[in-house]
Each structure stands twice: as C-alpha cells, then as structure tokens.
Image (cartoon, coloured by chain):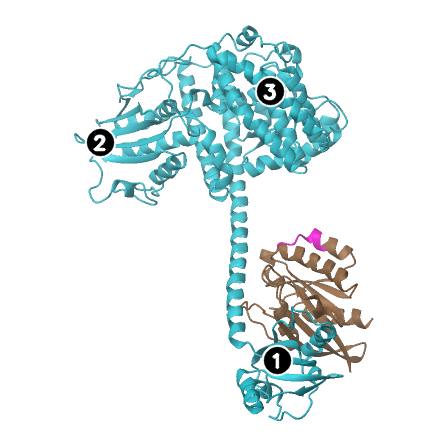
Amino acid sequence: MADVLETFLAEMGFALFEYQGEGSFFPLAQLPAWFRNLWSESNSATIPLALPEKSLFLENFLFEAEAFWASPTTVGCQSETWIEKSPDGREVPLQAKALLLNGKRVIAIFSPESEFREQLRTLQTARNALLDHERLAREIQKKEILLHCIVHDLSQPLSVMHVAMDCLAGESISERSKQFLTLGKLASEQQETMIRDILHTFADDLRASLDAGTEATASADLFECAQKVMTSLGPTFDAKGVRLSVASSVQANAQWPVRAESSRLQRIFSNLLENALRYTPAGANVTVGVEDEGAFLKAYIDDEGPGLPKDLRPEQIFGLFMKGKQSDGKAGLGLYFCRITVERWGGNIGCVTLPSKGSRFWFRLPHAAAAAISSTSRAAASSQAQSAGGGKPPSHPLRILFADDQKDIRTLTTYQLQRRGHKVVAAKNGKEALWRFRSGKFDAVLLDQEMPGFTGDEVARAIRKAESGKSRHAFLVASTGNNGPDDIRRLKAAGFDTVLGKPFRLDDLEALLASVTESAAPSHLPAPVPVGLKINFTDLVARVGGDEALLKRMIGTFLRDTPKRLAAISAALRRKDAADLASLAHALKGSVSIFGAEAARLQCQELQELGRAGDLTGADRLLTSLKEEIANLLENLRGYANQTPARPASKRPKRPRPPRKRVKHRR
Amino acid sequence: MLQKKICMLGSFAVGKTSLVRRFVESIYSDVYQTTVGVKIDKKNVQVNGAEVSLILWDIYGEDDYQKMRWTYLRGASGYLLVADGTRKATLEKAFQLEQRVREEVGVLPFVFVINKSDLLQDWEVDPALEAQIAAQSWNTLRSSAKTGEGVEEAFALLAQKMIG
C-alpha cells in the first residue's frame, strides 16, 4: 500500500520530504520526474538531500517553514511561485508547502505548471491593459495640451480684432461703416464660437460627466438664436439668390426658452441652414420656424431642394461622416454634431421630405422656464443696453491693473477702459504686474494667463499672499482661452475671483467690473435689509432702471440658483476645500448684494475670508446662520414674485426687447 | 567566494527583469513579459580586486494584483530600486517601496535606477526632480536595459556600497 501511495505522489508531481534539521531533507516518496530532471537526482528515496543548497529560494523559505513548525497555524505555510532553470534552460515554476504530519516536519514541493501559465496569461493581459490605459491617458493629455496651445494662439488675434472693433464702434463713423463693422463683429464672434466649440467638444469627450450638470441647467432663446444665425448667414443666402425668411406663423416677440447652450444652439441652426442652402436652387426659399409643443419647443428649417435621398433613412443622414452628393470640402460632421448636441440636451432631431417640395429638418428641445434664461444672455442683454447708451462712464470709476504681454490687446483694452472712465495701469508681463500692484492700489486686476516670466497664476498667488492679513482684497480676473472646468478650478485655487474667457468682449469685462463697483461702494447698494423685514422693492425696481420685468427675472434666477449655491458651499466645506469655499462664498456675496441683504452679504464675506485664509474654524456655524438669512431673503423674494399677475397659460410673457423685423433677404 | 544577495524592487513593467537579463546574459527583448513569482540569478563581479558573487532576486513588480512579500528581503545586502522614466507614477511607487523597506527591514544600501533612458522623447521625469532625488544623497542613475547604458554601473555601484 505504501508503495502505491509513493508512486501516486510521484505521479501527481509531489516531492515529499521530512525535515531532519540543519538543512537536511529525507525523501518520503519517490522523486517525481521534474525534480530528477531539474536537479539531476537519481530516483533513490533513501538519501537525505540538502535542499537549501539546491535552491536559494528554498533556503529562504526554510525560515518561514521552521517558524510554522514551531507554532503551527491553521492558515498553513505555503510559498509563492518561484522559477528554477532546468539544465536545458527551461523555466520550471515551483511552489513549496510546509506541513506538520503526525508530528513530522514535512515539506511538499510541486510544480503548478498549468495554474502558473494561467496566472501568467491573466496577469499579462491585465498589465498590458494597464499599460495601454496609461499610454492612452498620456496621449490624451498631450492632445489636450496641444489643443489648448492652438486655442490660445487662435484666440490672440481674435482678441485684438474684438477690441479693435469695439474701439471703432465708439468712433464717429458712417451708418454704412457701422453695418460693415457689425458684419465683421458677427464673423469674428462666429469664429470665436467655433474655436470654443473645438475646445469644448474635446473637453466634453474627456470630461463628459463633469459638464453634464452645466449642460442641464443652461438655457437659451430658440428663436433669438435662429435670428442671429439668419442675420449672419444672410449675405451668403443673398449671394446664391436663395430667399431666407421666418415662417409667418411665428410669434416673433414671444419668448422661446429652451434647455440649451446659446453658442452651440446657434451652431446647430448654422449647420442646418448651411445644409438647406446647399440643396436649394437659386430663386427658391428657405424658411425657418419655431413651434410650441408644450414640454418641448420645436424649430424647423424648410427648403425647396430635391428632398431627402431615397436610399437613406432619415436617421442615417445624421450619422458620423455622412456626406451628401453636394458636399465638396465637407467632413460630414455638421449634422452629426447637431444630433449629438440635441440629444445631449434631452431633445431629438429628424428630417422628412415635404409633400409639396423640398425637405424639412427639425429638432425639438425641452422647454426651459422663462426665468431660466442664462446669465450669459442676461449679461449680453445688459451689455447691449450699455452699448446702446453709448458707453457712458461708470458711476464708480475703478482703479484697474491690466497685464497682457500682447501689445495690441494691452493698448486697445487700456484705451477702451479709460474711455469708459476707469483709471488703468497696464503691465506688459507678470513681473511688471506684480511690481505695479505692490506700488499702487487697485480695485481690480485683470491678468492674462500666459505671460513670459511670471504666469497669471503666479502673479495671483503672489497678490493673495501680499494681501493676507489685510482687509482689502483686489478683484482678480483671469483672462484665458483655456477656460474649461479644470482650468477654472485651478485658477480659482490660485486666488482668482473669476475667469474671463479669451477673447473677451469689453462689455463682458465691464459687467464683471460692475460687481466690483457694487462691493467697493456699498453706499450705492440698496439699504441693508435687517432680518425679518420686508425688502424695499421700490428701491430695487428703481435700481434696475424701473424695469420690473427684469427684476422679476433676476429674482427668478436668484430663487433657482441660490439653493444650489448653498449646497455647493456646504459640499466645499465638507470636502474642506478652502479655495472653493472662498470662491463660492464670493459668488453668493455678489448675488445677495443685489438685493441689499447686508447680513447675508457680511456672512458670505466672512466665509470667503475664512476660505482664503485656509482656516475653516467656525465656518460650519457661519454657514448655518447664512442659511437662515438666505431662507428669510428667499421668502421675501418669493412673496414679491407671487404678487405678479398670473400669465395666461396659452400665451408667453413678453419681455422688453428691441423691435424685431422679420428677417428676409432678397437678392 | 563572498556572496551578496540583491533584490530588484519596483513597480510592474519598469524593466527589472530586463536589467537582470542585460547584466547577467547581455540579452534584451522589446517584448514585455510580466514576471510572476521570483527568479534568482547569479553573476560574479570584481569589487576592490576581490571576486564577489551577486545573487539577484528578481521579484515581481508590485501592483494591485501582486503585493510584495517582505520575507524575500531576508539576508539581502542591498537592493536596486527601479523606476521607469517614461512613467512618472513609477517613481512614486519607488519612493513608497524605499520607505517600506526602511520600515520592514531597516536601512539597506540601494541604488535608484531610472530605466528606459533610450526613450528620452517620452521622458516624464523632470530634471529638477532628478536633481532633488540626487540631493537626498540617493545614488541615482539613468539606465537602459535596451542599450545597456548605466546597467553595469548600477550593479557595480551597488556592489561597492554593499562591500563598503
């Protein structure tokens, strides 16, 4: 029976030894073939072997085995795999196990060949995948950097063009020149949008989840976007002799708010209109319309071309790289862009051959509440109002430090800001900016990001360091073409209060500076609102130029945004993210200041200062008080908003805007 | 003959096995083959005129799949700490391993090798960081198992440090 067992163990590939001390092992069974081949041993099972001399690994393992034999554990004592080389150069994987059998100290050695190969395959696959992932991540990073460089380079001349045209607009020029100027501005804005789209499309691919929140909350006016694009494309339609018009059923003065981002919505219209123009013969019509479908608003573009290709399904037309027969020089991305963008905003898109003639391309987007018109649109509206006012000097001129290494931008921006009544000191690089800041007093500092020597980040950090311990904080604005979510986080962590996308318009900068004026001159704010007292809405209406509708929209936005801002502050506090807390508190401070909520403003200010100092002691308590203040303020504002007359369900409220003409271009 | 045990430590795919093969057998392969378990090799070198047998323990690279067994360092006279210059994260892993060796085994002579110097176009290690590492009185070398650059030097330096 013993012979059978011995043979069985050898057949199974186990080499079994009893340890006799001092490195000597006595074989308990016949030695398996692999063992004999590996160490050139005879088949004898009668001679003790000095295993540690044969294998340095076993010499090391013996320490563990002896510890186990001295105090056995239920876990046992088994080695990992090690590799020995056979005399013919083959690698033999081995494992050893220490056992205590009937008081005997036993070591079993075996070759787990198949398990080893399997483990090797699995690990090789997993590690190759990890290396591929790392490689890919590096490639993406390189492309992102390259893209940012390209965007930066493309943005520079655009900045100059914008500012130069702004300067021209302020000069005495003929009506005809003004028209040319308007066309030039539209074209440069279109180019700016395209550059941003490139950046955003790449950034979206890389950070889709990060952007999802912003996408869902942005809103734009569907018809307004359509009209802007129609104006911009008008000359092109004229040149081909195609009439472009708005459908007669459209209520031009109504509001058409949809959940979308304005610049990309314009891009959708632009792609669809260019597509319609491509297939419409001279003398025919292209008509743009919008329709209210309740929860969704629909836009359509009708052309009088040949209709949809018969061999393609409508959904194929919106596929990637899908090109029609008349699409020379086109990549087949335009309609694909439209589809992915519309679907991303929760809408859908389609096309159909019209029964009479031509085709209709349509898309529908979720209806957004009227109050949800994006802050960008409001800023633009307010800046338009400012421009209409002929660029009047601000009521509170600011002392502004402006640093940009581009001479043209520096000269033109300085000229424009000075013309608007501000006192401007210009610096040509970061080093000079820092020196000027230290030798002067400034309400606001506008810093280009990519300057030789000190970058904008470095100057901002130095400024914040210089300010630490002082009550005064300059309003720091970063001007950069790289303004993705990660960039904004980085810039805010460096100490910037806000980020201005480059190329920027002076009106946008002016709107930002207006918030500095508010915080720098509290006497011009409405009277502080003590807790429990009603807000003086008469003052507030007067403050927005008597435009009650505008005030209501501002209140609507405030009611919608403030709980989110408070939640973001709470989250920053939970994360102990001092920089984020400072920036969020600063933003909320600006909002509450508008409504004259002084107690809340001061609490925001305190939170901001705690964040900037990096010491969050007491911030929790402060936030609790702030929440109470805000709750009170929200209640007051809600009460005011509810006093507004109810709107008829079938009719959209009108908002004041310049009278629109039906856009119609004829050759 | 004097024997000295050397362990090869570092993240996975930094080139530990390739360095050993280059040093012992003067062989290099571009194909990455992961190491499972432990491989032991020997090479005799001259240190201060005396012949020393270096016992090289090529230990699998540590990652989420395989954790180091610190018992392998038992009896080691020193170790070669290896990182991949084209993957910055492997330097972090090397710093962690060095700290763990100090905690688990104590202070041992070692040489820090930043491998794959033949791929300088993909180099991710900032020269300032390399200078900073050297300033910590770490013996740091760039190496390439592919070209052989720095390989003999790294082992010779380590042998010198072990013999004292």
In the figure, the shade used to draw chain A is: cyan
Residue A17, quarter of picture: bottom right
Q: Which residue is mark 2?
A: A281
Give the amino acid type for the residue marked by disc 3 in the picture: Ile
Q: Mark 1 belongs to which subunit? A: A
Label 3 Cα crowd, 10 Å radius (few <14 / some 14-19 / many 20+)? many
Neighbours of disc 2 within 10 Å: few (<14), some (14-19), many (20+): some
CA separation in Å, label 1 and label 3: 74 Å
Q: CA distance from mark 2 to mark 1?
A: 86 Å
**Apparent side of residue A153 relative to residue A570 in the rendered image (left or right):** left
Magenta segment boundaries in residue numbering: B124-130
Q: Which chain is brown?
A: B
Report x, y in % for residue A507. 53, 20
Question: Which image quadrant is residue B60 in?
Answer: bottom right
Q: Secondary structure at mark 3?
A: helix
Looking at this rendering, what residue extends furthest in the right direction? B164
Residue at point 34%, 45% (across, down)? A321
Q: Helix, strand, or loop for circle 2?
A: loop
Q: Residue A463 sits in which quadrant?
A: top right
Give the labeled residue for mark 1: A109
